[in-house]
Amino acid sequence: MDTIKISPSLNSDQKIWRYLTLDKFIDLISRQALYFAPLEKFIDSDPFEGYMPIPALKIFHGALGDTIQFFEKESLDRFEKLGAENGVPINTEKFKRTINSETDKIKKKSLKFMKILGKSIQVNCWNISDYESEAFWKLYSDEGKGVAIESTVESLSKSIFPTYSGNRIHIYPVKYVDFFDESLNVSDCMVDGQVVPLIKRKSYEHENEVRAFIVPDVDVKRLDEHKIEHVFVEVDLSVLIERIHISPFAGTAFKNSVKAVSKAFNIEICKISVSNLLSDSDKLFDLLES
């Protein structure tokens, strides 16, 4: 099995960004590992995380119902046949009630499994863009104090050490749809064959997100004992980080702190720059004079 699977919809040289507060930046470079959060952690900002749009959910539920209906019919036919072959009187109605009770348990357990699995999927999120985002600086900085890691899909993939032995890491873009749009078809609810955690509501389309994600093992027989956990995946920072951008809203002390911390963890200073989002406007006129 391949350790990493990249969506065919993504270009390997696609530029991606991860915006971080200083504490999360320090955590990244000190651990030299990416943090994969379970979708349950996003419940406050998006309670739909880990769920399917209604058309996909109906298909799943319908397929489950068809399977259970087939199981019920097969079980009843075999029970009646066994009774007839042995000349034993059978109580068909009692058997039906027993089967219905068991299939109800299967339905409930299947839905519970789907919910737990969805909330357990671990993700590391990036923004797809050729340019930095003023909105993201404000969203993911602490009062203007933040950094952005600039990388590419290929660099993200290659930064994960070959010694990684966990479940497969997928790197796929997110699709944004109306979860309650009944006109959606199956392909509308998928990204290159994947559903969760790659389908989000239209309200989050501004994120233009690509996700590295891991589907953990969930034992259907021990759902009540399952623990939803995060995971850290070790990476080669020299491969992952193409540039480190310091927020254009940050003061001098913060800029110096980022450089000092980076140097302490052997990050090349030449990779660090302050965003010019709020500067260089005079260069427009300089070009006219040249």
Image (spheres, helix red, strand yellow):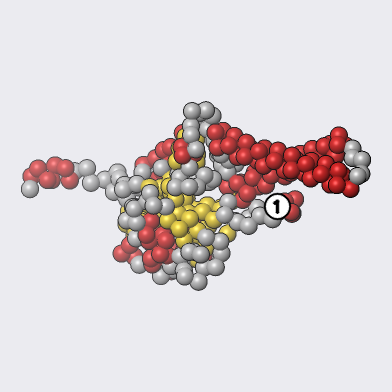
Residue at point 49%, 28% (across, down): 183
In this rendered view, identify the residue nearer to me: 151 or 137.
Answer: 151
Q: Amino acid at mark 1?
A: Val
Task: Mark yes or no: residue 18 visible.
Answer: no
- For this rendering, which residue is in front, 261 or 62? 62
Q: Is residue 112 left or right of residue 254?
A: right
User: Which of the 4 image quadrants contains residue 13?
Assistant: bottom left
Residue 86 visible in the current orientation: yes
* In the image, farthest residue toward the left: 290
Q: Observer-nearest residue: 105 or 131?
A: 105
Q: Specify whether 172 is left or right of 79.
A: left
Q: Position of residue 58 (x, y in %)?
A: 59, 34
Residue toward you, 267 or 261: 267
Q: Is residue 8 left or right of residue 82?
A: left
Q: Is residue 40 above or below residue 215?
A: above
Give the percent coordinates (x, y) of residue 63: 62, 39
Question: In the rendered image, which residue does mark 1 sit on?
Answer: 220
Residue drawn at x 12%, y 45% is: 287
Image location of residue 281, percent across then percent down = 22, 42
Say how many tags the image has: 1
Query: Dot 1: what SS?
Result: helix
For image coordinates 78% across by 41% down, the residue present is 77
Give the percent coordinates (x, y) of residue 186. 50, 38
Packing grade of label 1 (10 A; few <14, some 14-19, many >=20) is: some
Residue 94: quadrant of the picture: top right
Residue at horizontal 46%, vertical 69%? Answer: 161
